[in-house]
Image (spheres, rainbow, N blue to C red):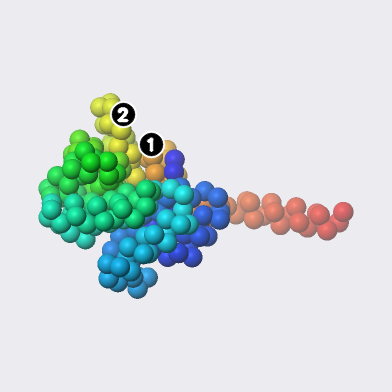
Amino acid sequence: MKFFIDTANLDQIREAHDLGVLDGVTTNPSLMAKEGIKGEAAILKHYADICEIVDGDVSAEVFSTDFKSIVEEGKKLAAIHPNIVVKVPMIKEGVKAIKWFSENGIRTNCTLVFSAGQAILAAKAGAAYVSPFIGRIDDSNWDGVELIAQIAQIYSLQGFKTEILAASIRSALHIVKCAEVGADVCTCPLDSILGLLKHPLTDIGLAKFLEDAKKM
């Protein structure tokens, strides 16, 4: 399973990269705004800066919601760097755009997916990635990890090549559960990745080793 970091913060991306487990980055307009990145020129430059840090796929999200504008915006994003994957929302115009992109050599990540039916449409249209938002599904009292498992089973049975990118990850446990049910990628904040390092028995064991080392 690949690890992506879900942020537009360059320092966090560098930290995840230096950890040695980072495979890519996902962003969205909210994350860009959080970093104070505003205006088309600044956004395009920020994506270029991210691509200089990470040797892997970088999802860059469109702001438009009509087919023509999504395509034009997506072409600009894809031109930034070969690793850019155009992030397109799961709407009717978005599915049409995903099909156009797939026929014209531009990889896409279909985002805001909340059902297996939506995931099937994204795969049929040729999306490289599909992003179910499991944390938001949990918030609505449904099981987000169960949706990942359902999509994984459907894709396996039907031979779809679209990769399942588990998004809206809230914890290290979410990452483990998604790995168990067949997610190809998890995208999450840096804290969730670092959470995988933590276990009280590791801390206890290390403290004992260090104590004994002083006696040598």
Q: Which labelled disc corresponds to residue 78?
A: none
**179 w.r.t. 70: above or below:** above
Query: Relative to the observer, which residue lies in front, 104 or 202?
Result: 104
Q: Counting residues from the N terminus, which is met first, the one under dot 2 or under dot 1?
A: 2
Residue drawn at (39%, 59%) of the image = 48
Residue 20 appearing in the image: yes
In which quarter of the view is residue 28 placed? bottom left
Compute the Cα span from label 2 to label 1. 10 Å
User: Element type at marker 1?
Assistant: loop
Density class for disc 2 (Cα within 10 Å; few <14, some 14-19, many ≥20) is few
Q: Which labelled disc corresponds to residue 156?
A: 2
Which quadrant: the C terminus? bottom right
Which quadrant: the N terminus? top left
| Residue 153 % position (x, y) | 30, 31
| Residue 103 % position (x, y) | 21, 38
Under mark 1, the amino acid is Gly
**55 w.r.t. 160: above or below:** below
Residue drawn at (78%, 58%) of the image = 211
Residue 172 appearing in the image: no
Q: Which residue is mark 1?
A: 182
Q: Is label 2 in contact with label 1 (beta carbons under 8 Å)? A: yes
Query: In the image, 131: left or right of 50?
Result: left
| Residue 80 % position (x, y) | 34, 55
Query: Relative to the observer, which residue lies in front, 165 or 77?
Result: 77
Residue drawn at (24%, 53%) of the image = 74
Farthest-out residue, right = 216
User: Element type at marker 2?
Assistant: helix
Query: Relative to the observer, which residue lies in front, 176 or 69?
Result: 69
Residue drawn at (18%, 43%) of the image = 100
Under mark 2, the amino acid is Ser
Query: In the image, 16: left or right of 97?
Result: right
| Residue 96 % position (x, y) | 14, 44
